[in-house]
Image: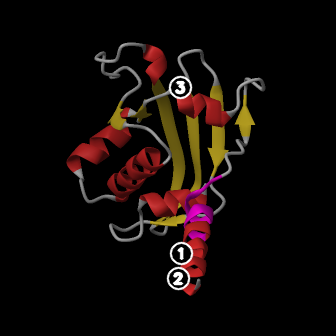
Amino acid sequence: MKKLIILLTFILSYHFCISQVYTPYFQNNKTLDFETFLSKCRYAHITLNTDELNTLINQPTSGTAYVISGLNGYLKQIGFEEVTVGSKYQIFSNYTSSCEVALVTPSWEYKNNSFLNLKLNFISCNEDSFSFVATNSIWASSTTISSTVFHNAF
């Protein structure tokens, strides 16, 4: 009996640790909830501007690289099968439908080795948009930025 109680406690604790309620800061289509949107998109494409892409390529140990790595893990954790990174014009065309791909545009401010005002905008093929704002800042280092940090921030 004691083992069963411990097992149930672990399962419930695990569920509450990984489950997440998705409440967008903004969404343009009130008839579509974010969970339904997620269930229809298999892939995520993180869109970055030219400067961010250059930083990612030329400085692979930069804070930007750590943020994108953590975001990549977070997107996989919430259900995307594959995550790519590039400009919004570099979406790979090997998908059966453009509606399988969600564009994910992150934005942030960087100050004193921290990422502040972190925002994620998810856009569907039908231009449905869901915007989320992080509840806390993220310290920039290879050991502190992970999918768990993103999970806790959003």
Quick one: quadrant of the C terminus?
A: bottom right
Cα separation between marks 2 and 3? 39 Å
Q: Do labels 1 and 2 touch, CB within 8 Å?
A: yes
Q: Point out the stretch of residues depicted in magenta.
A: 13-20
Between discs 3 and 1, the one toward the N terminus? 1
Q: Residue 99: x percent and y percent?
A: 49, 17
Q: Residue 123: x percent and y percent?
A: 56, 27
Q: Quadrant of residue 83?
A: top left
Q: In which quarter of the image is residue 85?
A: top left
Cα separation between marks 1 and 2? 6 Å
- Near-viewer residue (103 or 77): 77
- Give the residue at x 43% y 33%: 44
Q: In this view, does 14 lie to the left or right of 67?
A: right
Q: Do labels 2 and 3 touch, CB within 8 Å?
A: no
- Give the residue at x 59% y 72%: 8
Q: What residue would you read off at disc 2?
A: 3
Dot in front, 1 or 2:
2
Task: Give SS at disc 2.
Answer: helix
Q: Do labels 3 and 1 touch, CB within 8 Å?
A: no
User: In the image, what residue type sits under mark 1?
Assistant: Leu
| Predominant secondary structure, magenta span | helix
Labels in figure, total = 3
Q: What residue would you read off at disc 1?
A: 7
Q: What residue would you read off at disc 3?
A: 40
User: In the image, what residue type sits under mark 2?
Assistant: Lys
- Mark 3: few/some/many CA within 10 Å (<14, 14-19, 20+): some
- Near-viewer residue (37 or 71): 37
User: In the image, what residue type sits under mark 3?
Assistant: Lys
Q: Residue 32: x percent and y percent?
A: 71, 26
